[in-house]
Image: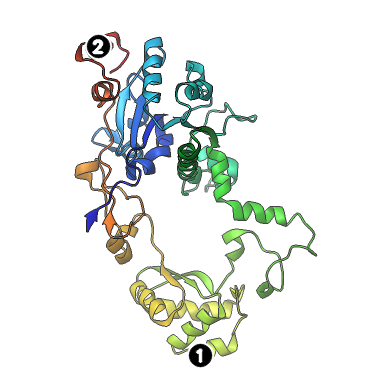
Amino acid sequence: MSTAEKPLAGIRVLEVSLLGAAAITTSLADLGAEVIKVEPPGGDYGRVMTWPIVEGDSLLFLHCNRGKRSIVLDLKTDEGVELFKELVTTADVVVEAMRPGALERRGLGYESLKEINPRIVHIAMSGFGATGPYRDLPSHGIAFDAWAGVVEPERDDHGRCTIPPHVSIGLNAAPLYASLGVLAGIIAAQRTGVGTTIDLGQAEAAAAFDWLRIETWRAYERPESEVTGNASDNFQRREPGTAGMSDGVRYQFYETADGHILFMASEQEFWRNFCEGVGRSDLFQRWPGTTYADHAVGNEELRSELIALFRSESTAHWAEFGTRHNTAIVPANSSKTLPTDPHFIQRTQWLPADTHGADMLPLPLKFDGSELEVPGRAPSAGQHSQQILRDLLQRSDAEIERLLAAGIIE
């Protein structure tokens, strides 16, 4: 299998970011864009901010900045700003992933950028966006999920509020929305010759990912004559999302002989196939259910039958059974056990620690007949400063030495 032509080859991105917000361009770098990370003197402190620390760099930094190049440029100096402007003339995209107005305060807002390069696509990603009462509110990744209602406080045994384990949605969803916006902006700029600026709040991205629950509660504000539950529940309204499935029986977690599976036979066809496959047609005859989305809510007698059935065989048996009998069953993994799953092993090629600093999950895109070129390790601070100035801005060695001595670059 050959290595793919980089899909975004020829696209140059200037990125000013700190911490996890650097994920805004990770997928672009994975797809072959040249991402130049413009760092402040001393570099992005995300290298030491979060655990685990792998040989001196945080895993978060290694992951979010893989495949990028780094230039340390002091944007608090006039000469540093002028160098940045020169780089803008060579770029397709400028990414600002910090508090709102960070570049504007240095004379590098979008109005200035488009005078330099009318085709430039500018995106500003911040915690809460460029407007609104929370615009300047300091925040970290969990803040976005707390604001969006994605994660809610739990209480420990002493009655104190705690943060429950959860996937960080705002931290991960916002970069995907940003990539979509950047690519749309590039396509439009190539067609029209005119760039654009995009404003993205990570908190809003968390809410957008949770659209079904949020929109369901909104729909329930309308009268029950207009908005009901589904026919299988006798049109009774249930809580949005998975909260409304806690008492489900045909759609539920079950323990196996060596782990857990998620059983999803809420469609009548899947349920019939399951019952016939395990030689228990009597279960279908007694509780046939309705055609769609019938979870057999509250049927504890049926639940007891299924508990005994699933405990009788291994997780691997039930996964194979689901394929063979066309019924929806999936192994239930944890983030720790997932890499041992046979499907994961076959489809996921780790980006290895010896080339990336830590073992990392790749971009989950598979191009027909080819493989994406691996992005490479995250840079050290200023690793490419001299090379970038020499290659892109045609600075002489003597000029580069002067800039180093003056602290304009590192």
The reply, left or right, for residue 233 in relation to residue 318 is: right
Determine crowd level at label 1: few under 14, some 14-19, many 20+ residues with C-alpha closer than 10 A. some
Find residue 272 and report its horizontal and vertical position in percent: 52, 84
The reply, left or right, for residue 24 in relation to residue 240 is: left
Q: Quadrant of residue 81?
A: top left
Which dot marks residue 366?
none
Q: Which residue is mark 1?
A: 281
Q: Which residue is mark 2?
A: 399
Give the label, 2 or 1, closer to the camera: 2
**233 or 192, nearer to the observer:** 192
Above or below, 354 against 76 in this view is below
Above or below, 11 against 73 in this view is below
Residue displayed at 21% across by 42% down: 355
Q: Give the amino acid type for the residue marked by disc 2 in the picture.
A: Glu
Residue displayed at 57% across by 26% down: 136
Give the structural element (helix, strand or loop) at label 2: helix
Above or below, 131 against 363 in this view is above
- What is the number of callouts on the image? 2
Q: Give the amino acid type for the residue marked by disc 1 in the picture.
A: Ser
Specify whether residue 253 is in view: yes
Residue displayed at 41% across by 19% down: 85
